[in-house]
Amino acid sequence: MRNYVEEVVRILQANFMNRAAISWVVFKQNLLAKASGAETIEQAYPAVVSAIVTLGDKHSMFAPARLVQESKLPTSKQPPLYPDEPVPGDIGYIRIPWVVGSHEKLDAYIAHVQAQIKERDKPELKGWLVDLRGNAGGNMWPMLVGIGPVLGEDTLGYSVDSNNTKTAWRYEKGKALADGDIEAETANYYTLKSANPVVAVLTDTLTASSGEAVAVAFKARKHTRSFGAGTCGVSTGRSRFYLSDGSIILLTTAVFADRHLVRYGHSIAPDEPLKPAEVVPQAIRWIREEYQAKK
């Protein structure tokens, strides 16, 4: 049992995003004490779960071998998909929902989002509402490709690990790139009729994880402002580590940073905190004002 506990601690100590803030000697002693009555690896699982909770980052989790074998990784209950908001004719609108699944599902997601942008794009638009409310996360790369035409071609942000190693996110020509490696792409990418538009980003407390990555990608972008409520507070990246018994630790290994290298890792506050009913009207009002000022 001690070997299993030591294996867990080794992975956490080497890779956890905030590893420098933890006294690993004490952490290991506490985990060994909690697992002391365990005679099998499975009996040690509650101690491992408890240890991961004490990391305090709200994003890391443990999946026992049995669930891994049954392909039942713990996921938060899938939230509903929100409906689109009606907007006036001079405003573009696109919702970026959560997404998980196979390559085919992710490709279909990208195609759907870009097709909606193409359908709603008109020369007379004053700007775009990008709606991230209810986006509980999943895979950030198809999201960045989907919204790429509105975001524009640029370095969008970074993942920064515990060694301060920075992985840059980029969008260009239908591709989302991590340090130059293609993470998601679409061959038939769309280009806006008016480049670099005014953008209002809408967030709420359900905007989480990869949804927060998209919010970060819009931070520090010109002619961009966010409206609504602070995000969930897990603006961090996870990595998957397999244990010797087949269990998995999904461990927070990086924090999201915007294109100016401002780090998050916590709830992302909107530029304009608003009650739900005020969000869309205020965002539209601002888009029209910013459009006039930008001309």
Image (cartoon, helix red, strand yellow):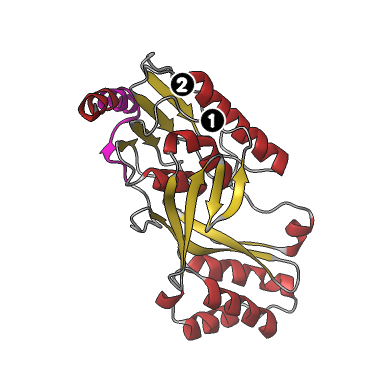
Residue 108 part of the magenta segment: no
Residue 180 x, y percent position in the rendering: 54, 56
In which quadrant is the C terminus drawn? top left
Work out which residue is located at the far top of the displayed protein and give it.
89
Residue 228 x, y percent position in the rendering: 34, 35
Mark 2 or mark 1: name the one nearer the start of the chain.
2
Toward which corner of the image does residue 87 lie, by quadrant? Answer: top left
Q: Amino acid at mark 1?
A: Tyr
In which quadrant is the N terminus drawn? bottom right
Q: Nearer the viewer, residue 113 or 37?
A: 113
Identify the residue under disc 2.
Answer: 121
Would residue 232 be visible to someone looking at this image?
A: no
For label 2, the crowd category at 10 Å Cα-Cα, with few meaning under 14, some 14 to 19 and many 20 or more, is many
Residue 196 vs residue 293: left or right? right
Residue 41 x, y percent position in the rendering: 73, 74
Q: Main secondary structure of the magenta part?
A: helix
Element at badge 1? loop
Element at badge 2? loop
Work out which residue is located at the far right of the displayed protein and give it.
69
Cβ atoms at labels 2 and 1 below 8 Å apart = yes
> What residue is drawn where x is 47% and y is 27%?
94
Q: Which residues are magenta?
A: 269-286
Identify the residue under disc 1.
Answer: 190
Image height check: is 65 above or below 225? below
